[in-house]
Image: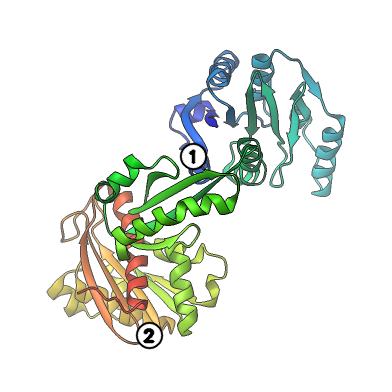
């Protein structure tokens, strides 16, 4: 099944909002084993939106549209779908009543413009929106399944996960099932992983082999089609075993077993708590850990010591140590760990300090230091991260989490 995505909104073209929806939907389509061949952005113009929908529906089996179904006059995705399908707009009295109740339950007067959200192209079905007032739409335009969902990620993602992807898979798998297994790796570049698995990539049609790069981790996706799930897994298993054999310890997890989940499991097994002491990453490591539900069982807190004075006052890093070694140094990172362990009462601490850019802070831009302290040992490591400031910081967060994982596994780096 070929799926296309279309984002509607002039603000996307002007760069006022980043089209993160495209990445989220693309990732979900890839994980589901659905082919995603084309992605487009169009402004708030009825003729251009209609033309984009018409073009997509002649190429694809399914089209997912984000944006343009709100209550304001520039929300014209409904009109464009109706124009592309050659049908009129209709009005749902039931949904209008739902809107009035929704506003009334919150003690607010509903603006009449919200009734635009009760309009829909003839023949379309409404998709429930558990997070907002704009319902999604699903209908056929020619031979193509068309879905429209809000552009707000918090509203869009549940609708994609709970309605659109299951609907597409049900149609796609009418004569069988497609199963994907995602192996998560860290420690090698995408190009090196490709070299190590090139013959599998070229020589395997079922299952297929694909690579997904994300925040310095490389995912190897194995996707197989068979009459049932057991048959698909039987096709995947020997290829997975060969991938694991070749990549060895670089494979740290599979499917939804992220590094954050793994290290929290490791901490739980030992009964240890964890905290962070962060400079250049500004709390991003703590945010990554606490994004996992249940992290409070192990995570106790974070000290974001961005300025030298805070490193000294809050974490007790000696001024002489900084003067001798510099802010961006392994001794300072280790002292940050020790200080945070004392302040937070944490068994395990990971610390980061570095020069993310554009200012060097006494070290070459991209120089990042990670330290990990456990009740058993404490070590630090200096890394050179590529790219701009945000990429350096993102890669450092990933590296910090993996260094904690290695330390908890007893696989300390030299």
Helix, strand or loop at label 1? It is: helix
Question: Which quadrant of the structure image shows residue 152?
Answer: top right
| Nearer to me, 114 or 199 | 199
> What x and y, as percent, mark residue 156?
61, 41
- Classify 10 Å Cα crowding around label 2: few (below 14), some (14-19), many (20 and above): some
Question: Which quadrant of the structure image shows residue 121?
Answer: top right
Question: Which quadrant of the structure image shows residue 369?
Answer: bottom left
In the image, 414: left or right of 182?
A: left
> What x and y, as percent, mark residue 73?
67, 23
Q: Is residue 339 above or below residue 135?
A: below
Tell me the quadrant of the picture where the C terminus can be found.
bottom left
In three-dimensional space, the C-alpha distance between marks 2 and 1, rounded to whole angstroms, equals: 44 Å
Q: Residue at x 32, y 69 (%)?
A: 403
| Nearer to me, 271 or 189 | 189
Tell me the quadrant of the picture where the N terminus can be found.
top right
Q: Residue at x 32, y 53 (%)?
A: 216
For this orientation, the residue located farthest to the left is 324
> What x and y, as percent, mark residue 330?
20, 72
| Earlier residue among tags 2 and 1 | 1
Residue on which the image places disc 2 = 342
| Nearer to me, 198 or 367 | 198
Q: Is residue 91 above or below residue 25?
A: above
Helix, strand or loop at label 2? It is: helix
Residue on which the image places disc 1 = 26
- Classify 10 Å Cα crowding around label 1: few (below 14), some (14-19), many (20 and above): many
Q: Is residue 126 above or below residue 380?
A: above
The numbered dot on residue 12 is none
Q: Residue at x 86, y 34 (%)?
A: 94
The answer to whether residue 281 is seen in the rendering is no
> What x and y, as percent, mark residue 64?
58, 31
In the image, 81: left or right of 285?
A: right
Q: Residue at x 70, y 27 (%)?
A: 139
């Amino acid at each position: 099944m070929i799926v296309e995505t279309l984002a509607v909104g002039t603000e996307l073209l002007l760069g006022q909002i980043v089209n993160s929806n495209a990445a989220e939907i693309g990732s979900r389509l890839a994980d589901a084993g659905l082919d995603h061949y084309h992605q487009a952005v169009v402004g708030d113009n009825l003729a251009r939106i209609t033309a984009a929908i018409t073009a997509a529906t002649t190429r694809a089996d399914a089209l997912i549209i984000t944006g343009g179904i709100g209550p304001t006059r520039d929300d014209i995705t409904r009109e464009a779908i109706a124009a592309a399908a050659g049908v009129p707009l209709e009005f749902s009295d039931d949904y209008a009543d739902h809107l009035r109740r929704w506003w009334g339950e919150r003690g607010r007067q509903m603006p009449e413009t919200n009734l635009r959200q009760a309009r829909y192209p003839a023949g379309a079905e409404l998709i429930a929106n558990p997070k907002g007032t704009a319902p999604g739409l699903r209908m056929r335009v020619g031979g193509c399944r068309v879905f429209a969902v809000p552009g707000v990620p918090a509203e869009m993602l549940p609708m994609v996960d709970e309605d659109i992807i299951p609907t597409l898979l049900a149609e796609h798998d009418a004569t069988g099932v497609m199963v994907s297994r995602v192996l998560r790796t860290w420690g090698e570049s995408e190009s090196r992983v490709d070299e190590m698995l090139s013959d599998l990539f070229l020589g395997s049609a079922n299952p297929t082999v694909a690579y997904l790069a994300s925040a310095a981790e490389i995912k190897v996706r194995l996707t197989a089609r068979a009459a049932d799930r057991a048959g698909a897994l039987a096709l995947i298993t020997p290829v997975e075993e060969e991938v694991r054999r070749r990549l060895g310890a670089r494979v740290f997890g599979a499917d939804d077993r992220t590094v954050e989940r793994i290290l929290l499991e490791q901490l739980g097994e030992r009964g240890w708590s964890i905290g962070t002491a962060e400079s250049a990453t500004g709390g991003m490591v703590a945010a990554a850990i606490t994004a996992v539900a249940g992290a409070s069982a192990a995570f106790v807190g974070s000290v974001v010591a961005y300025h030298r004075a805070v490193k000294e006052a809050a974490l007790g890093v000696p001024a002489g140590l900084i003067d001798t070694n510099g802010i961006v140094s392994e001794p300072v990172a280790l002292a940050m760990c020790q200080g945070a362990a004392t302040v937070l009462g944490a068994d395990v601490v990971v610390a980061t300090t570095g020069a993310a850019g554009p200012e060097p802070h006494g070290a070459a831009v991209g120089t990042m230091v990670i330290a990990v302290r456990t009740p058993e040992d404490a070590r630090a490591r200096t890394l050179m991260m590529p790219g701009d400031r945000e990429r350096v910081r993102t890669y450092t967060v990933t590296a910090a989490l993996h260094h904690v994982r290695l330390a908890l596994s007893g696989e300390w780096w030299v």
